[in-house]
Image (cartoon, rainbow, N blue to C red):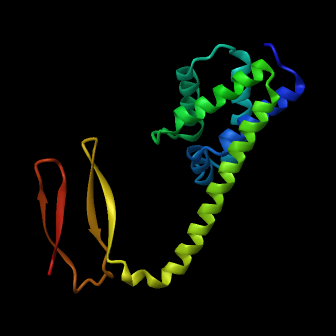
Amino acid sequence: MAGGGEDSRALFRAGVRAALQGWPALQIAVENGFGGIHSQEKAEWLGGAVEEYFLRNADLELDEVEDFLGELMTNEFDTVVEDGSLPQVSQQLQTMFHHFQRGDEAALREMASHIAQRMYRVRATMVTTAREADEDEDDVDSMEEMEVTAMNDGTATDGVCPQPEPSNPDSQTIKEEDIVEDGWTIVRRKK
């Protein structure tokens, strides 16, 4: 390894941790306790495991990194990552490792800084959106429909789902169930 100095290794370690902290799939798994009561500790351990994986395997292909991360997410957090972020995070990590191998500390700093800035912008946007949502809660009655995406045999179909009405046993009863040939069950209300 050409540039495996302590400063480079510390920068690589910080970059790995930043990439993992900025990975929405991992953060959702941690926040929702998919890894059990020790989800946060597992996420911290994951950073060291990924760093060690790269240091022990100098010539990794992108698909090997993806497989490793996917396996860790499945085994440690009972999570299958299907949002398309796995290749992106794997590519970030692989690029950082190449900078580390060359001893390019400036590029490592720049990547870690870029990831951290992007995380900050995403969090700031999420906070703003959450505040706007709190303000809009007073206006819930004006929302009559919400758009949903349903999965039917692996194909996405867009539809509109009406706003649920308050539950009143006298005003709503289920009239009938129809099984449509594609496997969906339609439940209609008696009016």
Count of numbered circles in the view: 0
Residue 81 pos. (x, y %)? 49, 39
Please tell me which residue is depicted at 49% across the width and 85% down the height of the picture.
Answer: 138
The N terminus, quarter of image: top right
Q: Which residue appears at 49% of the width and 80% of the height?
A: 137
Q: What is the quadrant of residue 66 in the picture?
A: top right
Note whether residue 45 is visible.
no
Which image quadrant is residue 135 in? Answer: bottom right
* Residue 182 visible: yes
- Using the image, determine if residue 76 lies above or below residue 126: above
69 in relation to 165, above or below = above
**Above or below: residue 110 compared with residue 129:** above
Q: Nearer the viewer, residue 76 or 52?
A: 52
Q: Is residue 66 left or right of residue 169?
A: right
State the image coordinates of residue 153 (x, y, percent, origin top left): 24, 42
Left or right: 99 in relation to 144? right
Q: Give the left or right position of residue 155, taking residue 63 as reference.
A: left
Quadrant occupied by the C terminus: bottom left
**Residue 93, position in %: x, y?**
65, 30
Residue in view at x 56 percent, y 20 percent: 64
Residue shown at the point (59%, 29%) measured from the top left: 91
The residue most toward the right is 6
Using the image, determine if residue 61 lies above or below residue 49. Answer: above
Residue 18: x percent and y percent? Answer: 71, 41
